[in-house]
Image (spheres, helix red, strand yellow):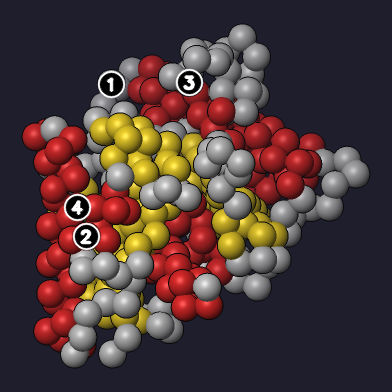
């Protein structure tokens, strides 16, 4: 059976799959990244995991994988297949594609940004299926996005498109790790909501999920924290929408798990801020934590078709 290897590498763990030509998940597995042992150990863990998946595919499906796709965090040079930098993995300038091609016996390998891989899957086979233009936004510990056009993700001229989390929505606000102040993710990420609710509630262990629960119970302090987040997120989305004019805005990540507690006020806030712009559909991501693997698989199939037609 024709299949590809898909790897979604996160800060603490890796999700992987063997994926058929019809995007069926034929096999799934998870492993730690082993980042506590250093960047060399992370790279070794990725290569070992990929080789294990190749062996499983050969044994179960009668032949090796046709290609592999890998999504990783941080700054990438997708054309050269180099993982330029990732603070949470501790690496810099890792020629990951070349290392994987060697380890996997010369099959085509595609390297992509983890959020953009999730966006690729959501846009092509998930919540944005059928949309010519879409914007995927992941609202978790940080905020990042993926710009989709005609079923593909635009990485930008320098591989850093979609960084909506670093749109300044509150000038002069909290310092951001990127060096600016008042970035969207300092106000509207799950981490920011968790910090604000921990302070407002007096519970240092409280997080964004606790805040959402308190909002649903009618707590006015929680509603104030949640309202700040919704307003800032709407400001960021409207800025992105004005520039990109997507037909669908797909919101995923941990904060989206709040469901209509997030989406009902967010849709209203976005609509209130629009003037001449067409109101886009604002929908939750549909693929859950399999999106990254599915996107890596799609990228692998795309890479294979490009090499075949070249």
Q: Nearer the viewer, mark 4 or mark 1?
A: 4
User: In which quarter of the view is residue 301 placed?
Assistant: bottom left
Question: Which label was assigned to residue 99?
Answer: none
Mark with earlier residue (1, 3): 3
Label 3 to label 4: alpha-carbon separation? 27 Å
Q: Earlier in the sequence, mark 1 or mark 2?
A: 2
Look at 28% across and 90% down and name the residue there: 1
Evaluate if marks 1 and 2 touch, with contact meaning CB atoms under 8 Å apart: no
Q: What residue lies at 40% left-to-right and 83% top-to-bottom?
A: 21
Residue at the disc numbered 2? 102
The one of 93 and 197 positioned closer to us in this rendering? 93
Measured along the vertical axis of the image, is residue 178 above or below residue 289?
A: above
Q: Looking at this view, is 195 or 42 the one in front? A: 42
Q: Are marks 4 and 1 in contact (CB under 8 Å)?
A: no
What residue would you read off at disc 3? 178
Tell us which disc is closer to us: 1 or 2. 2
């Amino acid at each position: 059976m024709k299949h590809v290897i898909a790897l979604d590498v996160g800060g603490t763990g890796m999700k992987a799959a063997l994926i058929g030509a019809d995007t069926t998940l034929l096999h799934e597995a998870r492993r730690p990244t082993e980042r506590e042992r250093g960047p060399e150990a992370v790279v070794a863990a990725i290569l070992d995991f990929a080789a294990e998946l190749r062996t499983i595919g050969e044994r179960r499906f009668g032949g090796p994988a046709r290609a592999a796709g890998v999504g990783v965090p941080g700054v990438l040079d997708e054309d050269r297949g180099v993982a330029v930098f990732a603070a949470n993995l501790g690496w810099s300038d890792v020629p990951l594609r070349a290392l994987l091609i060697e380890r996997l016996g010369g099959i085509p390998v595609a390297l992509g940004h983890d959020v953009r891989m999730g966006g690729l899957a959501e846009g092509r086979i998930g919540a944005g299926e059928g949309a010519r233009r879409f914007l995927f936004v992941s609202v978790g510990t940080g905020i990042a996005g993926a710009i989709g056009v005609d079923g593909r993700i635009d990485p930008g001229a320098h591989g850093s498109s979609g960084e909506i989390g670093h749109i300044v929505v509150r000038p002069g606000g909290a310092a951001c790790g990127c060096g600016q102040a008042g970035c969207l993710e300092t106000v509207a990420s799950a981490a920011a909501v968790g910090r604000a609710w921990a302070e407002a509630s007096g519970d240092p262990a409280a997080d964004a999920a606790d805040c959402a629960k308190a909002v649903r119970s009618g707590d006015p302090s929680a509603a104030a924290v949640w309202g700040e987040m919704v307003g800032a997120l709407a400001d960021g989305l409207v800025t992105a929408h004005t520039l990109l004019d997507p037909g669908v805005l797909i919101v995923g990540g941990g904060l989206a798990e709040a469901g209509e507690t997030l989406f009902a006020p967010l849709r209203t806030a976005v609509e209130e801020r629009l003037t001449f712009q067409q109101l886009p559909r604002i929908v939750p991501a549909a693929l859950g934590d399999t999106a990254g693997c599915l996107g890596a698989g799609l990228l692998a199939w795309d890479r294979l078709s490009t090499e075949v037609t070249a």
